[in-house]
Image (cartoon, rainbow, N blue to C red):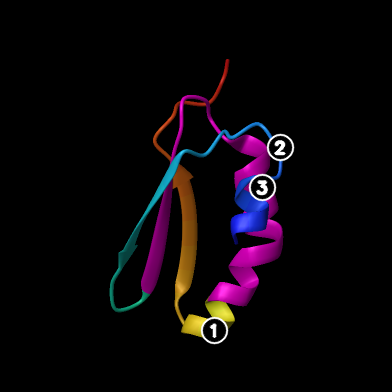
Amino acid sequence: MAEFLDRGRNAAVSDVSAQWDDDRLRITLVGDEHPAVEIWESQRNAVPLLESAFNRRVTIDSMAAPAE
């Protein structure tokens, strides 16, 4: 997961928080800019592995607003 969260090599993600409940793992990314590349790479590569490993639905979002 860490590899995909720095995919743009620009330190777009400065912190990560996670919330775990009965059926979902929600990962929230913190940064100054919306980490679109990092979210896309994580959803494509890491989320399927995490869902399989933890038997939970995994969602990734960001606290930063997408660029206009």
Q: Residue at x 47, y 82 (%)?
A: 54
- Highlighted range, magenta: 24-50
Q: Which residue is mark 3?
A: 40
Q: Which residue is mark 1?
A: 53
Q: Residue at x 53, y 30 (%)?
A: 34
Q: Earlier in the sequence, mark 1 or mark 2?
A: 2
Name the mark on residue 16. Answer: none
Picture coordinates of residue 31, whole percent (x, y): 46, 32
Q: Which quadrant: the N terminus? A: bottom right
Is the C-beta separation of discs 3 and 1 under 8 Å?
no
User: Mark 2 or 3, which is nearer the eye?
Assistant: 2
Q: Earlier in the sequence, mark 3 or mark 1?
A: 3
Mark 1 Cα-neighbour bin, 10 Å: few <14, some 14–19, many ≥20 = few
Q: Which residue is mark 2?
A: 8
Q: Is residue 29 magenta?
A: yes
Question: Separation of disc 1 and disc 2 at Cα?
Answer: 26 Å
- The amino acid at mark 3 is Trp
Seen from the viewer's position, the closer of residues 50 and 13 is: 13
Q: Residue at x 28, y 72 (%)?
A: 21
Question: Separation of disc 2 and disc 3 at Cα?
Answer: 11 Å
Q: Secondary structure at mark 2?
A: loop
Is the C-beta separation of discs 2 and 3 under 8 Å?
no
Which of the 4 image quadrants contains residue 26? bottom left
Q: Secondary structure at mark 1?
A: helix
Q: Residue at x 46, y 46 (%)?
A: 61
Question: Separation of disc 3 and disc 1 at Cα?
Answer: 20 Å
Mark 2 Cα-neighbour bin, 10 Å: few <14, some 14–19, many ≥20 = some
Picture coordinates of residue 12, whole percent (x, y): 57, 33
Q: Is residue 2 magenta?
A: no
Q: Give the side of residue 37 with respect to residue 68, left or right.
A: right
Mark 3 Cα-neighbour bin, 10 Å: few <14, some 14–19, many ≥20 = some
